[in-house]
Amino acid sequence: MAKVVSELAFKGTLDDITFYQTEHGNIARMKGNTGVTKEEFKNNPIFDRIRQQGAALGFCTLKSKVFKGLVQPFYSKAHASSLFGRCNQLLLAILREGIPQEDLNQQFYEGLQTDTAKRFLLGFEGNQCCPLPAVFTPPLSFDWERKQLSIQEISPLTMIIWPEKATQVEVQIAIANWHGLTNNRETLYSNVILITKSETEAQLTFDLDDLEEHDLWLAYIHFRFSYTQYNKVKYLDKVHNSATLIGVK
């Protein structure tokens, strides 16, 4: 860097020299080679970790679209803005459970087979603003043998936490099979059970067919609240609804 001594004031760039004004006068500086070229980033081992992290994040972003799609009808009615980002975080954690290798799909599939990954999946919320314990007070799980909830007889007024204005709720479950390597998947939805707040007792007994294959089985429950006005059903904003992963096998 040099100071320009001249009756003329220079500003701008001439060839490889940049002129600019400062409080110390007119300064001239050679243009440097800043940044990293595409080839350097691709081939320099110093950037290996950054490249690997970028590849993992890109892979999980694509995988998250599949994961969300397993029960997209539930997530479309019980959804928080953070859902996609939390899906990415969940699947990235599962990816890291696999043995590191160049084939990220194989690494993810191996990670998905671990007990740790199943613990990560269990309890995943589609709407973290309204998790299952904020909707249904008793602990709830899924019985794979009977394809039913662990609780089937409920007292709506005391066991369901009702949002303001809500007078009824639709409850539905779904089971899905997901092959984490090929992304082959199948989802089956139960009948919808309508429960009113005024009922003293209600039955949560669902009809579900059998999944054709067994790779990774996932079970979900969905609560959707509403009220009736002038004989028309008015659904509450989806922030009041829940969609929770309650079973993994």
Image: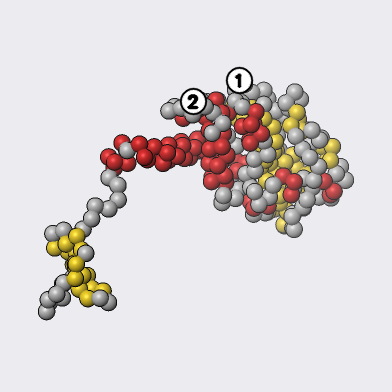
Q: How many marks?
A: 2
Disc 2 crowd, CA 10 A, few/some/many (<14, 14-19, 20+): some
Q: Amino acid at mark 2?
A: Gln
- Using the rendered view, name the quadrant where residue 185 is placed: top right
Nearer-the-camera pick, 46 or 170:
46
The answer to whether residue 104 is above or below residue 168 is above
The residue at the point 16 percent across, 58 percent down is 16
Q: Secondary structure at mark 1?
A: loop
Label 2 sits on residue: 106
Residue 171 location, x and y as percent? 72, 41
Residue 91 location, x and y as percent? 55, 37
- Residue 52 as seen in the image, left or right of residue 233: left
Q: Amino acid at mark 1?
A: Glu
Q: Secondary structure at mark 2?
A: helix
Residue 217 location, x and y as percent? 64, 27
Label disc, if present, on residue 213 of the rendered structure: 1
The answer to whether residue 27 is above or below residue 226 is below
